Amino acid sequence: MPGRIRQADVDEVKARINIADIIGERVALKTAGVGSMKGLCPFHDERSPSFNVRPQVGFYHCFGCGESGDVYSFLRAMDHVTFTEAVESLAARIGYPLHYEEGGGAAPETAGRARLYAANSAAAEFYRAQLLTAEADTGRRFLGERGFDAGAAAHFGVGYAPKGWQGLADALTAQGFSREELLTAGLVSSGQRGVYDRFRGRLVWPIRDLTGQTIGFGARRLFDDDNGPKYLNTPETTIYKKTQVLYGLDLAKRDISRGEPRRVVVVEGYTDVMACHLAGVTTAVATCGTAFGAEHMRILKRVMGDEKSAEVVFTFDPDAAGQKAAVRAFAETRTLNAQSFVAVAPDGLDPCDLRLQRGDGAVRLLMDTKAPMFEFVIDQRIQGLNLSTVEGRLAGLSAAAPLLADIRDEPLRRRYEHVLARRLGEDLAEVHRAVQRERRRAEAKTDDAAPPVPDESPREADAPVLRVTVASLPPSAGLERDALMGFLQFGHRIDSDLLTRALGLAFQHPALDAVRQSIVAADMSRPGWAADAVTATREPYRSLGAELLTAAFPARDDEHAVMSTTALARGLVMRSLDGEKSDLLRAIQRVAPDSEEGRTVRLRLRELDLERQAVLGAE
């Protein structure tokens, strides 16, 4: 049976992969210093970016939550795959053949995540081919009537699921997939008559993750004799979680991260996404059979980054359901460092119908007629109230004040107090008092819900070990800190003899010395040696090593960073030589000039002067 992947292959795949490309598919990264990139951490919620990626060394580190690692650990954490699956997926991505230690062949695939991706990809190809058959004429007419030609269908991967009960199942089992794998992928269902295709007689849209891999499908009913729901999606699987995916984001992510301003347009259906993209609004996405929620918001935050000018525009129907959806979406967008808007088309048309009736320009113009989300939500709360009466205004204030109370940004909250006062025709001071009352009520509920503080003090043995960070280092450690930062990031590019000499000197700060020792033990001839050194650093100093590896190095460009690192190495050597010279000068005061000890001290002083001149002369 094949064994583990050969270590040389593991290293080679990692060396050939740009970690910024892999992480950039999930996180909006931008340049943050020499050889460093930065974005919002995918492992915890944050408003300001603290997630650093250093492509040259293949390493990432979050200065907020402390998560760090290489491209394999990133995939394992994000995709919940094994180490072997992470290596195999990256090797397949670059077409690199892997070798295994006990037999040479790849391990036989099982019904794990890799097989789910493969099955969904094969199903997508099957459905696309079926759209060209005579049976799919109804599906092609459906697309044509909505303004989508064959090119549009191909761009979005739209396909057709034939009416038969076994078409997909038979095609995929012929390709080597088992019925159990197809069931696990949600492509077939199981009933009294056995296994049968889940989607039958429907148009099918492939749903892809951020990397472009097909993870599920959305299928639209076409025929009157189909008693199923209008839209039927893939059920929840290991790789498809409807609350964690946005249709079209794989196509929209590049334009979202590069736009000025960065804008995401959230629509309500697959055809709306298609219409928007074809009309030039290429940042449109849609939820998949569920309301817009917190997980969707977290995904958008990572793609959009921390741009304060970023916008999220929702296109809701003006009916009651659309109003409720807007209120729910507003609750999620409050955590986003961006402005949120609602765009309602004339006559309540969705983007697909708007494009059909009024053309591409009308879809683009829709983005210019957007209204601030908060104002839209306020209007929904007070809609139907008779604001000409005292009772109506009080009811409106009671309905809208809790919304304002939830806004943490005080300047923004005060501005919306003005908006609400104008909407209601109420005195601004009265609106402010009502909002403050709601804030105090919410704070009181939070205090009541807080767990009781234990009376006993924690035992000394239970005290957590404090994490040493770059920011917590004393100013006196500046030389050692900057030198280690340079060694980890550019050490392989400076004179090896100088580097060896500098690293051979014990550091004064124990945490920095622990990192130094791990660098000394690292094999710099191996790709990714710096990441290996950080991983090998003993706790509790490993996170400090990760910070030093990924922190922005203070230099104008790559060349100057190497020069600065060389100067820091010389600085460490000179500090050691100067320290030894000071000790000898003090010692010579205590010994007889003609003694053996005195002659030894004077000889060493002359040697030190020569060494200092050699170090200084090498600059």
Image (cartoon, rainbow, N blue to C red):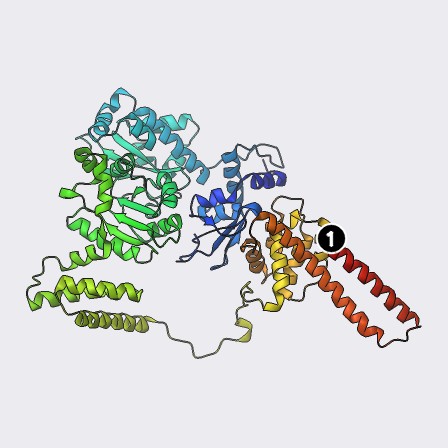
Q: Residue at x 60, y 46 (%)?
A: 528
User: In terms of depth relative to the viewer, which is nearer, 426 or 8?
Assistant: 426
Spot occupied by residue 425 in the image (x, y as percentages of width and height): 12, 65
Q: Residue at x 59, y 50 (%)?
A: 531
Q: Identify the image quadrant of residue 121.
A: top left
Spot occupied by residue 355 in the image (x, y as percentages of width and height): 21, 35
Q: Label 1: which residue?
A: 618
Q: How many numbered discs sit on the rendered protein?
A: 1
Q: Is residue 325 visible?
A: yes
User: In terms of depth relative to the viewer, which is nearer, 356 or 94?
Assistant: 356
Spot occupied by residue 371 in the image (x, y as percentages of width and height): 21, 51
Q: Amino acid at mark 1?
A: Ala
Above or below, 27 against 480 in this view is above
Spot occupied by residue 444 in the image (x, y as percentages of width and height): 28, 73
Q: Is residue 501 left or right of residue 175?
A: right
Q: Residue at x 28, y 35 (%)?
A: 274
Above or below, 474 against 81 in this view is below
Q: Identify the image quadrant of residue 424.
A: bottom left
As drawn, which residue projects farthest toward the top?
Answer: 134
Q: Residues within 10 Å of mark 1 (few under 14, many from 20)?
A: few
Q: Residue at x 64, y 51 (%)?
A: 563
The quadrant the N terminus occupies is top right
User: In terms of depth relative to the viewer, which is nearer, 294 or 580?
Assistant: 580
Q: Identify the image quadrant of residue 148.
A: top left
Q: Is residue 315 visible?
A: no
**SS at badge 1:** loop
